[in-house]
């Protein structure tokens, strides 16, 4: 069946869930689905799950292009997942080459934090901003950086990984090989070291005025603020956004983040800085992946 080059599929592959959406060229959501990430989330099992989910969201093959966001750096061509440190076995995985013949669609890969940032810049909280740092707070801590209105991807497409910067030389070991990375203080696992329960319940307790819950979120926010302070010094953004699964608690931890940044960063480096939550929630990643597919694949003249 013929595909429609004006429709795009965006995939947000996370450690616990895979979120998919089919969009038109204006970014309107036409269909969606979500499924648990296979456990263990090895490349073969994830590839099979992705193929099945994409057929579910687009059974009649209306979309010619697929963008997949993954938690790690891609090669510069968007074909190979170089490494996904929180997914087992993901080292130099040619996922685009695996998917294309199975799907009969063109595929491009991107870092999931970059996808979320592209989505927010297109239709969310980063509209009208040129210099933005975004952090995704979930199983790991990813993110993206936009400078002068363009994604900053660095040498060979491996930037940016803001969750892997060091904040404590004696801190817990990270799957990246670092020690005391921001991810070890701002991921879901890090929060669970402070409170052995569900983050949503912790937010509910904080909203009801529970002192222990409020103190835990404040502690979490201070640690996150330390990492964000370093990122502000490097990039001097206009806007810092937080998204991902833990962003539901942002109302409780962002005040501590802002206080920490104000304490640690000199005024000239944070002049006019805003720190706030993503506007699109967990939908930013799949929207941004679809947008990147539109930009990359149409720009090189690919056609079904």
Image (spheres, grey):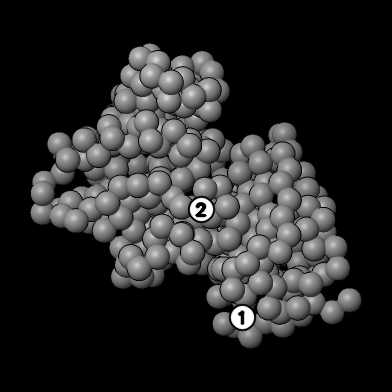
Query: On the picture, is 120 further left or further right than 273?
Result: right
Q: The C terminus is located in which quarter?
A: bottom right
Residue 299 is drawn in which quadrant? Answer: bottom right
Residue 184 visible to the viewer: yes
Q: Extreme bottom residue here?
A: 301
Residue 73 visible to the viewer: no
Say if 81 sits above or below 151 in the image.
above
Q: Residue at x 50, y 43 (%)?
A: 244
Q: Residue at x 68, y 54 (%)?
A: 20
Query: On the picture, is 211 further left or further right than 204?
Result: left
Front-most of 165 and 218?
A: 218
Whichever of labels 1 and 2 marks the residue nearer the N terminus, that label is 2
Q: The N terminus is located in which quarter?
A: bottom right
Q: Position of residue 9 (x, y in %)?
A: 69, 64
Label 1: element kind? helix
Q: Which residue is mark 1?
A: 298
Q: Which residue is mark 2?
A: 280
**What crowding class fits label 1: few (fewer than 14 Cα within 10 Å), some (14-19), or many (20 or more)?**
some
Residue 213 is drawn in which quadrant? Answer: top left
Q: Residue at x 53, y 22 (%)?
A: 201
- Which marked residue is nearer to the observer: mark 1 or mark 2? 2
Front-most of 280 and 18?
A: 280
């Amino acid at each position: 069946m013929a595909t429609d080059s004006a429709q795009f599929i965006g995939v947000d592959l996370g450690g616990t869930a895979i979120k998919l959406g089919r969009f038109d060229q204006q970014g309107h959501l036409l269909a969606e689905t979500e499924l648990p990430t296979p456990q263990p989330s090895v490349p073969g099992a994830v590839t099979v799950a992705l193929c099945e989910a994409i057929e579910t969201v687009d059974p009649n093959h209306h979309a010619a292009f697929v963008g997949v966001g993954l938690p790690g750096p891609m090669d510069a061509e968007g074909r190979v997942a170089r490494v996904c440190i929180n997914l087992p076995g993901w080292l130099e995985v040619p996922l685009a080459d695996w998917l294309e013949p199975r799907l009969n669609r063109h595929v491009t890969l991107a870092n999931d934090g970059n996808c979320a940032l592209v989505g927010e810049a297109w239709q969310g909280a980063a509209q009208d901003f040129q210099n933005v740092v975004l952090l995704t707070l979930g199983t790991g801590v990813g993110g993206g950086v936009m400078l002068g209105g363009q994604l900053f991807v660095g040498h060979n497409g491996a930037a940016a990984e803001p969750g892997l910067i060091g904040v404590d030389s004696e801190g817990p070991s990270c799957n990246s090989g670092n020690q005391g990375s921001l991810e070890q203080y701002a991921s879901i696992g890090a929060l669970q070291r402070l409170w052995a329960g569900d983050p949503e319940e912790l937010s509910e307790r904080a909203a009801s005025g529970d002192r222990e819950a409020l103190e835990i979120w404040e502690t979490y926010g201070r640690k996150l603020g330390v990492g964000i302070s370093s990122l502000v010094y490097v990039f001097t953004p206009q806007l810092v956004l937080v998204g991902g699964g833990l962003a539901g608690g942002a109302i409780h931890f962002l005040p501590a983040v802002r206080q920490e940044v104000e304490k640690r960063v000199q005024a000239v480096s944070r002049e006019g800085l805003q720190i706030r939550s993503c506007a699109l929630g967990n939908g930013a990643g799949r929207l941004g992946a679809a947008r990147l597919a539109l930009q990359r694949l149409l720009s090189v003249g690919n056609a079904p």
